[in-house]
Amino acid sequence: MLDREHRITSAADYKHVVRRGRRSVGGSTVIYTTKNPNGGLPRFGFIVAKTVGNAVTRNRVRRRLKALAYEAVHGDLGQNGSLIGCDLVFRAKPSAAVASFADLKADVVHAVAQAAR
């Protein structure tokens, strides 16, 4: 589970990342990334709309995305601290409901690589 300091919690922060961030479109997600002007630890937000499916499906997709965010911070996706000071918002497309974990991971790896540049 992501620690509180790794989560975007305010609506204003979500809005800022989605409106001003760089967009990375994958097969089942759209990932917005921006640099946090305050620096600090990487923060993540998740948007899973009702178009993805019922509550059970949406929660499963959200849990998968959270696991990938955790892996980006603590695992091999982080690329040696390249996410320091980044804010990322994951927006799930309706196809995320049937996407495999590997497909979601490929989208996240692509977005993390873009954020590192």
Image (spheres, grey):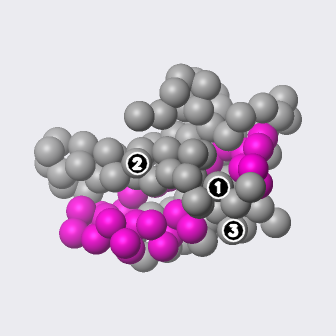
Residue 44: % across, % down: 56, 41
What amino acid type should be assigned to the residue bearing mark 2? Ala
Q: Secondary structure at mark 2?
A: helix
Residue 89: % across, % down: 56, 47
Q: Name which quarter of the figure residue 5 lies in.
A: top right
The image quadrant where one finds the C terminus is: bottom right
What amino acid type should be assigned to the residue bearing mark 1? Gly
The image quadrant where one finds the N terminus is: top left
Q: Secondary structure at mark 1?
A: helix
Mark before the other along the chain sequence, 3 or 2: 2
The label on residue 96 is none
117 relative to 13, above or below: below
Image-based side of 11 in relation to 52, left or right: right
Label 3 vs label 2: CA separation? Answer: 18 Å
Closest to the camera, between mark 3 and mark 1, is: 1
The label on residue 67 is 2
The label on residue 113 is 3
**Which of the two residues, 22 or 112, is positioned nearer the viewer here?**
112
Magenta segment includes 98: yes
Q: Which residue position is annotated with label 1?
A: 78
Q: Residues within 10 Å of mark 3 (few under 14, many from 20)?
A: some
Q: Secondary structure at mark 3?
A: helix
Q: Residues within 10 Å of mark 1 (few under 14, many from 20)?
A: many
Q: Which residues are magenta?
A: 81-109
At horizontal 67% and vertical 40% (from top left) the residue drawn is: 42
